[in-house]
Amino acid sequence: MEKCGVCSENLSEGAHCATCEQWFHYQCAGVTKSGYQRLSKDKKLNWRCVKCKPSETAHPPNSPRPDSESDLTGTEAVLTEIRALSAKFAPLEGLKEEVLALKKEFLDFKSSMNTQFSDVVNEFRSKINEMEQRIVLMDKVQCQVDQLQERIDQLEEGSNRNEQWLRMNNIELKGVPQSNNENLIDIVAKIGARINYPVSKNLINFISRVPSQQKEHFKPIIVGFCNRYIKEDFIAAARYELKTSPLTLELEELELKKLHRIALLK
């Protein structure tokens, strides 16, 4: 197992000096582990410790040796200061590598974030466009609904007018006795004969009894003539007959058991 060239303690990994062939703890060598590991293969092979860097600079090959002891002492002092400064600045090389690596990671992260942000923006725009298309479609549907509602209102108004117009052709007969299996058309025909206004089946559009609020009375008969003129002539004939004598029908003719006065109303 290798020993550190500074503290002489065992080490399992560290920095290797290409000049003195010694191993050093990262802390003893003045470098960080991450900074040293980021060095390229060539830089690791040529890496030198603090002692070897200034020694080669201070005594290059074939350089003359100091002539006097004072010069040697001054040189040693300078070298000592240089070694101290080198020891202080040695971590900067590894720190530089760390800064460059962090810068690269930051740029990669920034590029990744820009890509993700762009994807999110595009997706958001796509959803907005889809919602706008749905809104346009809803507006069209609402317009169609409004048109249909307007058409329905017109039809209802027309239906009400037609219903009112048809009611103008109706008369209501009250007080006519009611029996099972009665023939309302025959009853109206007999009333017409009584007032001297013959009423045939083809003059009647519809005829029916309707419920009455007074349960003790007979249900009134609603007669709808084919047109207003027939109705007016029928009423005029009935009024003329009422001036001369009460409008009554013989029970035998109606197949009933009592004699009732028939009220003729518009």
Image: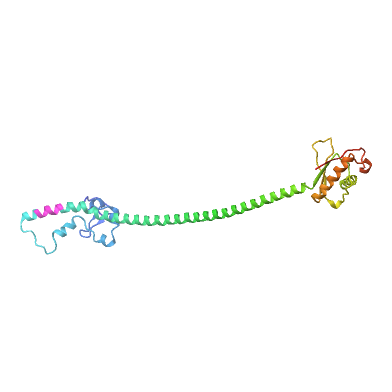
Q: Nearer the viewer, residue 201 or 10?
A: 201
Measuring from the top left, give residue 223's x and y in whole percent. 82, 46
The residue located at (42%, 54%) in the rendering is 117
Would you place residue 56 above or below residue 159 in this image? below
Q: Is residue 118 visible?
A: yes
In this picture, residue 44 sits left or right of residue 233? left
Q: Nearer the viewer, residue 25 or 78?
A: 78
In this picture, residue 166 sits left or right of residue 51? right
In this picture, residue 115 sits left or right of residue 152? left
Question: Which image quarter: residue 76?
Answer: bottom left
The residue located at (85%, 53%) in the rendering is 202
Measuring from the top left, give residue 28's x and y in whole percent. 23, 51
Q: Residue furthest left?
A: 68
The residue located at (19%, 54%) in the rendering is 86
Residue 33 part of the magenta-drawn span: no
In this picture, residue 91 sits left or right of residue 177? left
Measuring from the top left, give residue 141's x and y in whole percent. 59, 54
Prevailing secondary structure of the magenta residues: helix
Q: Which residues are magenta?
A: 74-81
Measuring from the top left, give residue 143's x and y in whole percent. 59, 53
Residue 77 part of the magenta-drawn span: yes
Q: Quarter holding the C terminus?
A: top right
Q: Is residue 247 visible?
A: no
Would you place residue 250 above or below residue 143 in this image? above
Q: Nearer the viewer, residue 8 or 82?
A: 82
